[in-house]
C-alpha cells in the first residue's frame, strides 16, 4: 500500500516496489489541501501509466482551521507550509486502509534532508511501533527513498522511463506551478541540476 500524492517521489516509490514484485495499491489522501485536484489527477495518471491497482481516495475535512499554507489561502506559501502531524495522519490512514485490504506494508515517498520533524526516520520508526500496537499485528512502514534527494529521485524516474512531467508538485495547486513554494523550489533546482549535468 503506497501513499500516492501524484508527485514524483511517491510515483518513483510505486515504480520501484512494482519492479521488486510487490502488488501496489495506491492510496491518495485528500485533506482539503490547495493542490488536491491536480494531485488526484496526477495520482490517477501515474497509477495508470505504471499499471498498478486503481488508486483509492480518502477524503477528510476541517484541516483549514490549522495555520498552514497547504490548506489555507492568504498565508505565505513557503514560510507557512508546515501542517502539524500531516505525515502521522497519512501513516494512520494508510495503515487503516492497508489493514482493510490485508496488506502489512505501508510505503511513503519520503526523501533525505528533512525540513519538518515528521519527515525524519526516527519519526517513522516511532509511528510504525504505534501502528503495530494499534492494529495488533505486524505492519511495516517503508520509506525506500529516505537516503535520496530530489535530484536522485528524478534520475530514477528518468532511468526507468517514468515521465516526471505527468507528476504534480506545487503546494499552491495552480495550473502553472507557482515557483515560490518549498516543493516548487526543490523540483526546479533538481531539474536545473539534471540539465546542467547532462550539458
Image (cartoon, rainbow, N blue to C red):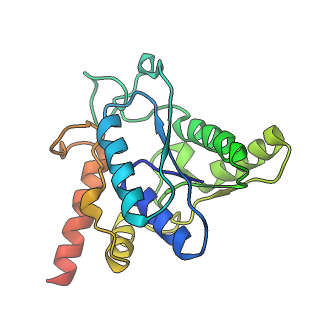
Residue 10 in the image: state x and y as whole percent: 45, 57
Q: Is residue 47 above or below residue 192?
A: above
Q: Which residue is pictured at 73% across the width and 55% down the height? A: 104
Residue 134 versus residue 50 in the image, above or below: above
Count of numbered tags: 0
Q: Residue at x 39, y 68 (%)?
A: 153
Q: Residue furthest right?
A: 136
Residue 148 visible, this angle: yes
The quadrant of the picture occupied by the N terminus is bottom right
Relative to 105, is 195 on the left or the right?
left
Find residue 13 and report its horizontal and vertical position in percent: 49, 63
In depth, the one of 120 and 107 nearer the eye is 107
Q: Residue at x 48, y 53 (%)?
A: 114
Q: Taking 19 as reference, is 137 left or right?
A: right
Q: Is residue 78 visible?
A: no
Q: Quadrant of the C terminus?
A: bottom left
Residue drawn at the location 48% of the way across and 48% of the way down? 55
Q: Is residue 10 left or right of residue 22?
A: left
Q: Position of residue 194 (x, y in %)?
A: 23, 74
Front residue of 93 and 65: 93
Instruction: Indicate the position of residue 75 as horizontal and vertical percent values.
Output: 28, 24
Task: Identify the residue at the far bottom of this view.
Answer: 199
Amino acid at each position: 500500500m503506497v501513499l500516492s500524492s501524484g508527485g514524483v517521489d511517491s510515483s518513483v516509490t510505486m515504480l520501484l516496489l512494482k519492479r521488486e514484485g510487490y502488488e501496489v495499491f495506491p492510496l491518495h489522501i485528500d485533506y482539503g489541501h490547495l493542490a488536491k485536484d491536480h494531485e488526484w489527477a496526477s495520482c490517477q495518471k501515474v497509477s495508470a501509466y505504471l499499471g498498478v491497482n486503481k488508486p483509492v481516495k480518502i477524503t477528510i475535512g476541517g484541516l483549514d482551521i490549522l495555520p498552514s499554507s497547504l490548506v489555507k489561502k492568504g498565508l505565505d506559501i513557503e514560510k507557512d507550509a508546515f501542517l502539524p502531524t500531516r505525515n502521522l495522519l497519512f501513516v494512520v490512514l494508510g495503515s487503516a486502509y492497508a489493514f482493510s485490504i490485508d496488506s502489512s506494508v505501508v510505503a511513503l515517498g519520503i526523501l533525505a534532508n528533512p525540513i519538518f520533524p515528521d519527515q525524519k526516520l526516527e519519526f517513522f520508526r516511532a509511528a510504525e511501533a504505534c501502528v503495530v500496537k494499534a492494529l495488533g499485528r505486524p505492519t511495516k512502514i517503508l520509506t525506500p527513498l529516505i537516503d535520496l534527494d530530489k535530484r536522485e529521485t528524478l534520475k530514477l524516474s528518468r532511468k526507468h522511463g517514468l515521465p516526471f512531467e505527468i507528476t504534480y508538485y506545487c503546494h499552491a495547486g495552480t495550473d502553472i506551478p507557482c515557483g515560490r513554494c518549498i516543493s516548487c523550489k526543490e523540483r526546479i533546482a533538481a531539474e536545473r541540476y539534471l540539465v546542467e549535468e547532462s550539458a
